[in-house]
Amino acid sequence: MTNQFDWTHLQTFLAVAKHGSLSGAARALIGSQPTMGRHIAALENDLGVRLFERTAGGLELTPTGVELLDHARQMSALANQLSLTAEGRTEAVAGTVRITASEVMAAFVLPPIIKALHRAEPQIELELIASDQSDNLLEREADIAVRMYRPTQADVFTKKVVEVEIGLFAAKTYLQAHGTPSALTDIAEHVFIGYDRDTQIIEGFASVGIKVDRHFFPFRCDNQLVCWSMVLAGYGIGFNHLRIGLNEPLVEQLPVEIDIPKLPVWLTAHAELKTSRRVRTVFDFLAERLKQI
């Protein structure tokens, strides 16, 4: 056994352990399956142990692999912390900043803001993760997160920048076919588009005294872009940011008086990045422009 090994091989070990296969690790690390296999073989040779066993379902950790996994994770966390600390000290504005935002925010709200940022800071490259999943800033999956809730991770700084109004909308084609509801008492006569596992809309109805369950919505999907597309297609009534709906000529805002809670918009970055000029520039630019929505 050698006392030294390739750090890249350890990253591959963590990826294979997480995804359970060489192909899954290859997708995560943007590599090839044969390369992942060579990395694991080399690491096992360097350490003198067997890390994985092949099974019908993929690769499973051996008892030794399980024992070493915790140590590998600790090493990865320390390496990430080293990178974050170094990044926090950089004075360069040029470079890449990775942003994660909800799919609706990424598709409808951020594009003109990113365009303006590019004009103001052309040396900054942006990578945008359009996802409603909570990306882990501590593991550098993103530098900045734009979320509709306050993140609770440790070692992050966060700022509430605005509250977004929500509206109730339907396609003009739907309203022509089914009429326009004018009060909450009319909702039973109409088709609503809801979420699948997400309970936000059900809880919103409950807050105004209307009890419904998931079966109230004949179409359900947790992807908000898909739900909005169903509204545009004339399937039924749905919710969206007020500004997005008012700017869409295919739909109309419904004249139903309902107190829909506003959604807060939070910007979050890792605490070590407070002193990174590049990340701070993007963070401050986003905060200022998002206030205008």
Image (cartoon, rainbow, N blue to C red):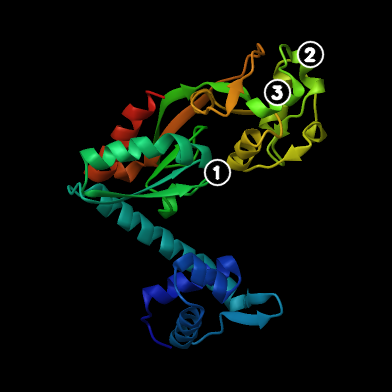
Q: Residues within 10 Å of mark 3 (few under 14, many from 20)?
A: few
Element under disc 3: helix
The residue carrying mark 1 is: 132
How far across and down, in percent of the image, does residue 215 sit? 82, 35
In percent of width and height, residue 176 lies at 70, 23
Q: Amino acid at mark 2?
A: Thr
Residue 178 shown left or right of residue 34 in the figure: right
Residue 132 placement: quadrant = top right
**Residue 101 place in picture, x, y as percent:** 46, 41
Q: Which label's residue is closer to the chain start, 2 or 3? A: 3
* Disc 1 crowd, CA 10 A, few/some/many (<14, 14-19, 20+): some
Pointer 1 and pointer 3: residues touching (CB < 8 Å)? no
Alpha carbon distance from label 2 to label 3: 19 Å
Report which quarter residue 232 is drawn in. Answer: top right
* Distance CA(mark 1)–CA(mark 3): 33 Å
Task: Please state which amino acid type lies under the numbered disc 3.
Answer: Gln
Q: Secondary structure at mark 2?
A: helix
Q: Which residue is under mark 3?
A: 176
> Would residue 33 be visible to someone looking at this image?
yes
Please name whichever residue, 78 or 208, is drawn nearer the observer in this view of the structure: 208
Q: Which callout, 2 or 1, points to the residue nearer the camera?
A: 2
Q: Residue at x 66, y 38 (%)?
A: 230
Of callouts 2 and 1, the N-terminal one = 1
Within 10 angstroms of label 2, few (less than 14), some, or many (20 or more) residues?
few
Give amino acid for label 1: Asp
Using the image, tell me which numbered label, if any, was put on residue 115: none
**CA separation, marks 2 and 1?**
32 Å
**Rendered image: mark on residue 185:** 2
| First along the sequence among labels 1 and 3 | 1
| Residue shown at the point (58%, 67%) measured from the top left | 19
Is 189 located above or below residue 13 in the figure? above
